[in-house]
């Protein structure tokens, strides 16, 4: 038997300048990791350190690691300038594999909420990924890189990182989710693949996002964590999926909303955080008034 996966969690963040305080969603990610997984350590890898009240609360419980961005991605010439603004995400794609190959452990995106610890036998696997709903144009399946577990020096991590430089084309999925699926067909003995329900029970579709943030659904019994797909809704200017955005994800929302995410995250909200039910009701009504067509479509199930 080879090396075990250590109970160390890695997060990569701040690969672009930080212009706003750390958001509550990110705090709840880290707080839920600490409470649920009881890791031996959380290594927070960053280039630009976060700031703000939520950061000051969680920072003492993290081991901070300054990160040197990958030279290949840093110098990549994007054809489409609208995609170039996501360079920070591509830098994180490469950083997570480099870190896991060198140190082993569990990587998760910062828009994760942890629900229960991984089964103990997972730590004997060399490498773990989970299925996700593939993009519409994908040939075959997709293994999402938002949650990865790896033993130090894992062969699958080595092969994926090496192949990523050739597969990288500036797109969101080719190197990050479609490539590992293809490699899993070539290296089946070097990876344990978990079902979609383990990490991605609610997917990136409009219905999946509405089920996370606007509705209440029962999660599968094997759900270890929830991925929140924040690139599709976090920005207030983006309401093509639903009328929920970072401004609506407040302590009041976590404390009082009857939704899948709010209920699951509630236990990680600090006890001394001031909340107000009336303020939440006003916030919810104001959001619906600001985006009436999207709110109506949600109520009618046109997602």
Image (cartoon, rainbow, N blue to C red):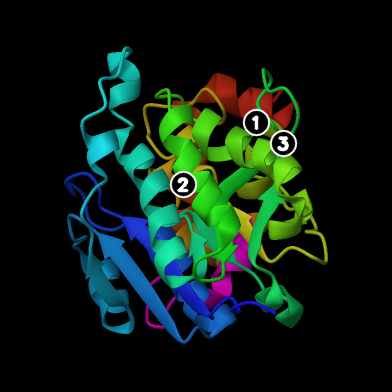
Image quarter (top left, top right, bottom left or bottom right) of the N terminus: bottom right
Q: Position of residue 23 (x, y in %)?
A: 33, 56
Query: Residue 225 placed where, x, y %?
Result: 64, 63
Residue 294 position (above or below residue 235): above
Q: Identify the residue under disc 3.
A: 133
Q: Earlier in the sequence, mark 2 or mark 1?
A: 2
- Answer few, some or many: residues within 10 Å of disc 2's Cα (few below 14, many 20 plus, some between 14 and 19): many
Magenta range is 261-276
Q: Which secondary structure, mark 1?
A: helix
Q: Which mark is residue 161?
A: 2
> Which label sits in the foreground, 2 or 3?
2
**Of discs 2 and 1, which sits in the foreground?**
2
What residue sits right under mark 1 in the picture? Answer: 206
Q: CA distance from mark 2 to mark 1?
A: 31 Å
In primary-sequence order, the first of circles 2 and 3 is 3
Q: Residues within 10 Å of mark 1 (few under 14, many from 20)?
A: some
| Percent x, y of residue 104 | 49, 70
Residue 240, magenta (yes or no): no
- Res 173 → quadrant: top right
Q: Is 215 left or right of 99, judged from the image as shown?
A: right
């Amino acid at each position: 038997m080879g090396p075990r996966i250590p109970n160390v969690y890695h997060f990569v963040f701040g690969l672009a300048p930080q212009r706003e305080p750390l958001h509550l969603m990110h705090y709840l990610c880290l707080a839920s990791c600490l409470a649920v997984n009881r890791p031996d350590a959380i290594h927070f890898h960053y280039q630009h350190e976060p700031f703000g009240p939520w950061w000051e609360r969680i920072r003492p419980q993290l081991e901070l690691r300054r990160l040197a961005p990958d030279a290949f991605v840093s110098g990549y010439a994007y054809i489409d300038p609208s995609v170039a603004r996501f360079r920070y995400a591509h830098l994180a794609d490469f950083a997570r594999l480099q870190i896991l190959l060198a140190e082993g452990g569990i990587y998760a995106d910062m828009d994760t909420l942890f629900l229960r610890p991984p089964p103990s036998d997972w730590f004997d696997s060399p490498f773990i990924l989970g299925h996700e709903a593939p993009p519409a144009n994908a040939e075959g399946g997709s293994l999402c890189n938002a949650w990865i577990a790896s033993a130090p020096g894992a062969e699958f991590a080595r092969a994926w990182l090496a192949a990523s430089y050739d597969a990288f084309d500036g797109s969101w999925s080719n190197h990050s989710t479609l490539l590992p699926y293809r490699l899993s067909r070539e290296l089946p003995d070097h990876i344990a693949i978990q079902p979609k329900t383990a990490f991605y029970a609610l997917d990136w579709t409009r219905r999946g996002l509405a089920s996370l943030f606007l509705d209440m659904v029962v999660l599968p019994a094997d759900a270890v964590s929830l991925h929140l797909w924040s690139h599709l809704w976090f920005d207030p200017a983006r309401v093509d999926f639903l009328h929920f955005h970072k401004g609506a994800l407040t302590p009041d929302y976590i404390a009082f909303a009857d939704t899948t995410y709010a209920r699951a995250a509630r236990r990680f909200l600090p006890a001394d955080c001031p909340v107000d039910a009336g303020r939440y009701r006003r916030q919810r009504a104001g959001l619906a008034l600001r985006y009436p067509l999207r709110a109506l479509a949600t109520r009618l199930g046109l997602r």
